[in-house]
Image (spheres, grey):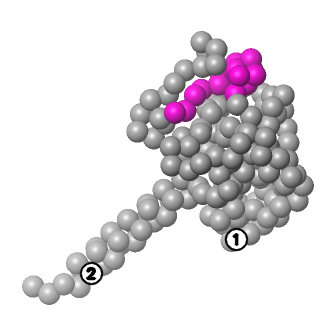
Amino acid sequence: MSSAVGLITGSNTTNLLEITEEADLDRVELGSLLMFQTDIQHYAVYVGERKMVYLTTHAGISDVLMGETDGEVSCVRIYVGHKDTNIFVDNSRDAYLKPYPPGTVVSRAMGKLGKAKYHLTKNNCEHFATWCRYGKGESRQVEKGKAASIVALGLSVGLRGSSFSSK
C-alpha cells in the first residue's frame, strides 16, 4: 500500500486499511472486502482493475423492511475521494475465518452477477461479500442490530415489570 493508506486502529477497526486515492486500489489484493463507510456500511468484493462486485436492491425502504426483495449483483468501477465516503479494506475476519484463495473469491463474486434476492437481515451486501470470501455469509451490522434490539426489549420488559411490582 502507498503511504496514503493508513492502518486504522481501535477495537472495531483492527486490520482496516483506508483507501485514500485511486492508485491505492492497484495494491489491494484481489478478493479483499471493501467497506464503504457513510451513514451506514456498504460492503463489496474487490475484483481488480479498480472494480468491485456488490449486492444491492433498488426497493424502497418500506419493502426492504418487510422482507425479501429483488436485488442485483453488479460489477462497477470504484471512485475514490467522495467527500462523504471513506473506503477501507476490511479483511479483519481473516483472524477467525479462512478465506478462499483470491481467484476463487473473485470467481464466486463474478459468478453471481445479475438478478439476486436481497434481505436486510439475511442476505445483504455484507452477507454477500463475506460469503464470497469465506463461504459463510455474516453481517456484523445485523448482529449489532440484533444485540441492540435484545437490550431494548429487555429494558422494555424490565421497565414494564417494575411498574407491576408489589410493595
* Residue pictured at 22% horizontal, 78% vertical: 162
How many other residues sit within 10 Å of disc 1, few (<14), some (14-19) or many (≥20)? Answer: few
Looking at the rendering, which quadrant does residue 158 occupy?
bottom left
Q: Position of residue 49 (x, y in %)?
A: 84, 28
Instruction: Give the residue type that dot 1 points to.
Output: Gly
Q: In the image as oriented, which residue stretches furthest toward the top?
A: 3
For the point 41% across and 34% down, the residue is 10
> How many discs appear?
2
Q: Provide the residue designation for mark 2.
A: 161
Tell whether position 16 is magenta: yes
State left or right for residue 100 relative to residue 162.
Answer: right
Can see residue 39?
Answer: no
Q: Quadrant of the C terminus?
A: bottom left
- In-front residue for pair 52/38: 52
Left or right? Give the position of 41 relative to 9. right
Q: Is residue 45 above or below residue 158?
A: above
Residue at mark 1 to residue at mark 2: CA–CA distance: 31 Å
**Res 15 label:** none
Which residue is located at x 90 percent, y 55 percent? 114
In this view, the mark in front (1 or 2): 1
Asked if one can make out residue 2 in the rendered structure from this viewpoint, the answer is yes
Describe residue 108's horizontal placement relative to residue 149 as left or right.
right
Q: Quadrant of residue 94?
A: top right
Outermost left residue: 167
User: Could you tell me which secondary element the residue under label 2 belongs to?
Assistant: helix
Whole-percent x, y for residue 51 in the image: 82, 33
Please state the horizontal and vertical placement of residue 152, each as a whole percent of the image: 39, 66
Type of the residue with mark 2: Gly
Highlighted magenta segment, given as a residue range = 15-28
